[in-house]
Structure formats: structure tokens, C-alpha cells
Image (tube, coloured by chain):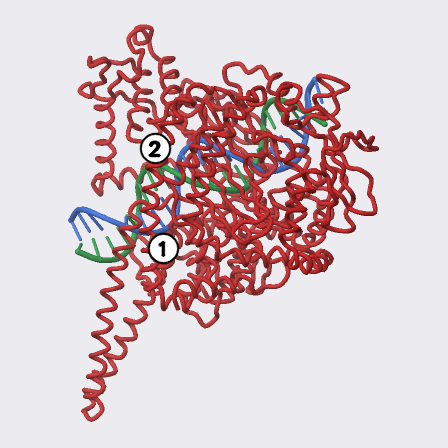
Chain colours: A red, B green, C blue
Amino acid sequence: MDVENSDNAENSALNGSGSRDSSEQLNGLTNGYTEKHKSHKSDHKDKHRDKDRDKHKSKDHKSISKDKDRYSSGKDKERHSSSHKSSRSDKDRDKEKDRDKHKDKEKHREEKKSSSSKDKDHKSSRDKDHKSSSKDKERDKDKEERKEKDKDKYKDKHNSSRDKYRDKEKDRDKRHSSGKDKEKKEKRSEKENSGYKKEKVEVKSEVDSAKEDSLDEDEPKLVIKEEFQSQSENEQNASTASSCDYSMSQFKDEPKFEENSCEEEPEENSDEDIPLASRAKRKIVDDEDDDVPLSARKKIKKEKKVKPEKKSKKRQLSDDEDDYDEKPIKKEKKKKKVKEEPVVESPKKGRKKKEEEQQEVWKWWEEEKKDDGTKWTFLEHKGPVFAPAYERIPDNVKFYYNGNHMRLSDQAEEVAGFYAKMLDHDYTTKKIFNDNFFKDWRKVMTDKEQGIITDLKKCNFKQMHTYFMDQAEKNRNRTKEEKQALKEKNEAIVKEYGFCKIDGHTEKIGNFKIEPPGLFRGRGEHPKMGKLKRRVVAEDIIINCSKDAKVPDAPKGHQWKEVRHDPSVTWLASWTENVQNQVKYVMLNPSSKLKGEKDWQKYETARRLHKSIDKIRTEYRDDWKSKEMRIRQRAVALYFIDKLALRAGNEKDEDQADTVGCCSLRVEHIELFEEKDDKEYVVVFDFLGKDSIRYYNEVSVEKRVFKNLQLFMENKKGGDDLFDRLNTSILNKHLNELMEGLTAKVFRTYNASFTLQQQLDQLTNAEDSISEKILSYNRANRAVAILCNHQRAVPKGHQKSMEKLKEKIDAKKDALKDAERQVKDAQRDAKHGSVKEKTVYEKKKKMLQRMKEQLAKLEIQETDRDENKTIALGTSKLNYLDPRISVAWCKKYDVPIEKIYNKTQRDKFRWAIDMAGPDYRF
DNA sequence: GTCCCGACTTGAGATGACCTAA
DNA sequence: TTAGGTCATCTCAAGTCGGGAC
């Protein structure tokens, strides 16, 4: 089977299920591709956003689309047998991509050059954008151009992978519709088939000139009025664009979209259906000014906020179990790599095993739960461990300023050391990082040093850097004895500080070590990257323990900031870090009762959602036709959260990286295409999500969603909120009304776990070998990781290791051919030969069989590794997948649990391993 | 209703222990 | 025995969400 066919087979496997299932979910995601992104948010956000996009393409654009094509494999066996061939084709594709990448880089460099001068002049934030329409236009134009270029590049690279999902997407969307809609859709499709083009023209005109909406007959007529003047409008009379109030008219017999109607239509609940922002503004600015988008409110909030220097407190088993736990952690690494041979136990392993056995197992899940809000009754611990005091570097390691040696003061040297250590890191090439570092570094300098060191460019940290690298190298090359001594020392620390006593049990603490001082490594284009994270001392620490516990001793000569006895929280110690003013906590290990219980509860909530999901989906689909704009927005946002597993998207402060989630999407983050690559009603998402990881996806949505989006975008600028009448708290409040405990986050958990269940059902073949089953599991896991957009950078040396593996496979194939010849000869000899010759024949046959198995394993390994190169499986495995699904799967298909979960993971999911049987269903 | 903040979960990257092949 | 590679573990940034003050 060639690659193409294989992919098709996989696709069809995905589409094989019934109503709206995980396959649909997956298809929605895999339709496009997402891309890792290290963004820039600098002076001019918009420009940088564009630049970043370029950057992605050139720097990080990986073969994730290929992975997406593959992850959903229906029949792995076929793939295994053809993996060799496939990987060749893949390599070719990779080569092509590399060539493209190179071109992109060149292009990007040019673009960057031309835009850099402009960037300097643009210190404006989003708020400023509203004020300057001309700048806006200029920027938008600029952006559009670049966007177009970007798109083309993406298109070139990823069309093939997207194409494969195009059909599936259509199918899914059809299936996504509830029965009623389906019928209508079918009827409509008949019409559409006859006059598709015409229909599309009509759609456009509906929006532009308030013509009749031919969508559905039962849809209320929507009148969009300019009921209010948006803030931007108020601020810029020059601009012709105006934000509108999209209040709804009464239902009429014929559904209609009326836009920009001049007619003022009094609404009974007009206040309900006003952008949230406007309500705030009305109160604060002008009682008469009725409707302002949320963004306006945000602006007011920001203006109101007097931010002293920095003050962005941001939001801010069964019986098998014991057997499973017998395998020491490290030994599993290799086992995970599809290794089936029994592992011979080393003495070290034996020791570890003993240790594991000694570990207390608290079966808290068999106890009755407390519901009084208290997390514990008794809590005792030894307090956190502080970072070691600073030790000066040797005198022969010199720092130079402007070519002259300078002996720095202790503090200045320590901070200089933080920078020197990072000299070969990307961070030090970033202006914001350097500026922040230099500013904070100067703060710790003596007056004299401040007088001399005035320019970072004149600082020479090279000797310091070399010194630190040498130290690191030395540490790596420690002798066995040194390593052992260090290990014992660390173990002693863990023994003393790494455990706490809680309600009669000893539990592991997660992070008992206080974060050492250093330079803040904000991700993406964090405006505070490079700032000094100062050393935390006892005087910063709040200790939490029970009243009847022994209060931990503060380090000699120090005292705790506070000792608290608060059983309503789970933390043992906390402090406020100085860079973002966020509270940091010392908490328990994931294997603890407190964490496990929460985890269990999380999956139970997701399972409850499974029971209500049909109702919820029907409801939000109905809400797409609501006469209230706020409800429509809520419904469309919920659809995205459900279908695409988007995060909720809280608002963020200006002093954080500019990333968004569903509710905080801006108009500039989506593009609408009535038709794109043979798909109808395509929404292209392109934004930076959590950790500044890029989310790019081309999704075909239902027509009504598409129409609503057009409506939401009407008369808005790129920087305006797409859902201007929605925020996470409104959404979650609504969700909680639909189901107790339901929040946006639950959809991610639900869809991830449901997808895993579905994929495992589809991909697992009871007859497969363990290796093949594990590959199937990884593929199911991978499907979820793609759904959740969990990406990683391609591991260093991935290509090299793939090449090596390839060589191994080739060598094995040659050996196999040779062995086959030998078997043939031996067979011929055995036919008329003696017993001895027959034995030889049997031996050779066995050897051949073994070699075939080895080859298969290698090929599976190759496939698995390559498919995984840009996808991080860990996050979904640890946070989104109900572990009971995996446990049940292992039990059902006789796969040892340690092939799926390593020791740490088994500890974390002990409750699941204990309680789930082979028949557990999510 | 808004804003702010505390408490917690989620997430990618860095580090280093350990395994395997040479 | 060692170099190289893999993966578990650690680290800490960055999210979500609920609740309280105003």
C-alpha cells in the first residue's frame, strides 16, 4: 500500500463511526495544522504578530501535517509492512519541506528588514490602534499583504495534508448537525447543488445589504442596528467604521438578516444584549451611551488601573497493580520502545523494587469523602528548601567592560552570572530580554558600578560563560563515587524535606525546593523576559500547617513571613515572586490523595458531561438563531470550544504575552471563506495560544456559524474582540447552569478522553502483538495531542537518529534475505537428509522468524518515532485522558500497564489502576 | 457587574540518569 | 568503557476558575 492509500484507509477508519463522535472531533482539528511558535510581542504588536507568523514558517514549521495525516491510522498492520516505503516517501516530502523552509527564511529576512524600521516607530498597543484610524488602515494593509504571503506559504506546504482531511471535515460537519438540522441541510443541499454559486452570492449580499436570509425558515429575523456608538467610533470620527449594536428584532415569519438598518428598534431586553463593554462604559462614561463593545470596557479598566511600576498580579487495580509497580522506573524507558523481551533484573533494579514495595499505598479512594471544604485535618512538614547561597566565581574568571577588567560586587556578579549562563540562548538575542536584564542588573550594582557600566553592549561575559560551561561539563563528568555521594546527599534532602504528614499518612511533596534566583524566562514575547527573579528568603515564605503540628524551623537567623493554619487550601508554603507578583506554592505530589481526588473528580465531571452533551449541543445549536447577540456569541464560542477543544481564553493584561483563547479571540485571528479548497464555510484560525504556541486551523463550519461570525465581525477592526459580549466568566456561568460543575475546561477533558476511547476502539486489534498494540495506543494518544494542540520542538538529532534507525532496518533486511536463503538451503538438505540436518533446518527457521519479528519491531519503532517528532504526548496523557480508559484497555488486551505508564505515572494514577476493570467505559 | 486575587491545573523546555551500541 | 541517545523527571511559566471587595 502506498502512502496515499494508506492515508485514505486511515481516514476512512476515522470516519467510520456514527453520530458526532471523536472522529468528528479529530477531523475538525486535523483539517488544518498547528504550528509551534515562538512569537514576538514588541513595540508594535500587530506587526510583530505578522512577523511571528513568518518566523514560524521559517523556523518552526515542522512536518506536523504529516503526523496529522498519519496519527489516525486505521490499520496499522498494513502500515507496518509498508513503513519502509512510506518513510522513504516521507523523507522526500521532508526534503521538499526543507527547501521550502529555506526559501521562507530568505523571504522572512527580507520582510523583517523592511518592517524593522517601521516597528521602531510603533509603540502603540491595541488601545492606541483604536485611536488612530489612519495608522490602523496602514497597518491593516501591511498586515494583509504579509498575511497573504504567509497564507501562500502555508498553502504550498500543507495543502496536501489539509486536502486529506477536507472530505472528512465535510462529513463531520454533516454529522455534527442534529437530526432536525440534518434534514434541513439535506433539503438545502439539494437546492445548493442546483445553484451553489448563486447561493453564495446571495449570502454575501445578505450580509451587505440586509437581504433575506435563505438559511432556515424557522430562524428569527435578525435586525442589526447601530444602536450605539462604539468607543472606537467615538474616538475617531474620521473612521467610517462603526461598531454596531446587534440587537435582535422580534421573530418574524420569514427569517432574515438585516444589517446596518438605520431604524432604531426598542428592545425589551436590549440591555441584556449589549456588549458587556458598553454597559461598563455607560455607567462610567455616559449614561446615554448604551452599547460599547467589551474592549471598550477593558480600555476603561486599563485606564483606571494605575500601575505602579509592575503590578500585574495576573490571573496570574486490581490485583495486577503490585506487579505493575515492580518494574523500576528507568528500566521502563527501553521497554516503552516496543520491547517485549523480559528484562533481567539488575541489583540496582532490585533495590528500587524494594523501595517501591516499601512505599506506603494509601487507598484513599476507598474511603469516604469529606464534603466540608476542608482539605486536611492534620498537616505537618519541614518547610521548603532554599536555593544555596551564592558563591563567587574564581578570580581568574574575569568580566570585562569596554575591554577593561572589572571586579564586580557579589550581587552584581551573581546577576551577571545569570546572564552569562544564558549567553548562547536565544533569549539573549532579544531586545526586551536584554533591556530588562540590564535595567534590573543595574539596580543591584553599587553606585560605582552603575557609574561605569552603562551599556550592555560593552559588557564581555565570555570568560564567565566559558567558566559556567566548563563547570557544567565537569558536573557531567563526575566520577561514579562523586555521583553516588551527590545522589545520597540529595536523597537525604528528599527524605527530610520531600515528605509531609497528612491525616495519618506520609505523602510526597511536589516542589519543596524554592525556585532559585535567575532571569525570568517568559515565553513568546513576554514583556518581562530578562527581569531579575530575586532570591527568595524565609522572610518571604508563608508556612501552612495544622495548629497541632510542629511548625517547621526557619533557616538559622531567619524567620517565616507568617505561619498559617488554613485547612481549606492544599499548599504547604507560599511566597510572592517579584517579577509578576504571582503567588507561588509548595504543594503535594500528583500521587497524593489531595491531587488524586481532584483528578478523579475532574474525570467524573467530564463523564457527566458525556451524559448531557447531546442536550447541550442541541441547545447551543438552537442558540445560534437566538434573537440576542450575546446568546449567539456564547453559542458560537461554545461550539468552537466543543468542536476544536479551544481553551476558554481569559483576558490578559498588557504586561503579559499577547496570547488568546476562544473568548478572547480578536477579529484578526480568524478569516472567513465562503469557499476554500473545495470546502464550504471555512474559518481559518490563526492565533497564539497558551505559551505562545501557534494555533492554525482551517475548519469548515456550519453555515449558521459562518453567518454568525460574519455578523460578529461586522464593522469591527482587526484588534476588536470577536465575541464582544462574552467573556469566560459569562460563559462559565452559563455552563454551570447547564450542568453543575461544568466549565469550558471540562470540554477539553471530555473531548480528549472520549477521543481516546473512540480511537482505541477503532485502532486496537486483539490479534496484534504487544508492539503493535502499543503503536495503536500511541496513535490514539497522538490523536488527542493533536486535538489539544500539544506540540513540541523536533528533538535535537531527530533526523540523525532516524537515519541510524533506517540503516539498522536496511541491515536487518539484508540479513533477513540472507537468512531466507539459508533456510531454503537447509530445507533442501533436510528433505533427504539426516536428523541433524533437520534440526539445523528447524533452527534456521526459528532464526528467520525471530529476525522477521525484529524487523517488524524496528519498523514500528521508526513509524512511531517519526510520527511523534512534533507532538508531545505527555501533556494529554497526564492531564486530559481519563486513566481508567488506558487501564481498562491494558487489562482488556493484556498489555502490561508499565508499557503505557511509567512509574511516576502509575503512582499518579494508582487510584485508576486499582478501580478500573477491563470493561470500564468513559 | 467589574476587578482583582488566590488557588489550583496545564504546559513546554531543561536537565540529567540510564541504557545501548560500538 | 564510553559516547550518544532517549526518556523520566524537574522546573517554573502560563493558563483556568471561583470568590470576595467594592
- Residue at 38%, 19% in the rendered image: A435
SS at circle 2: helix
Q: Is residue A537 visible?
A: yes
Report x, y in % for residue A83.
Answer: 35, 64
- The residue type indicated by label 2 comes to Arg
Report x, y in % for residue A804.
Answer: 25, 56
Residue where numbered disc 2 is placed: A109
> Which chain contains the residue that carries disc 1?
A
In this rendering, would A828 be left or right of A854?
Answer: left
Tell me the CA gap for discs 1 and 2: 32 Å
Q: Is residue A278 above or below residue A861?
A: above
Picture quarter with the C terminus of chain A: bottom right
Q: Is residue A358 visible?
A: no
Q: Looking at the image, is mark 1 or mark 2 earlier in the sequence?
A: 2
> Which chain contains the residue that carries disc 2?
A
Residue A865 numbered tag: 1
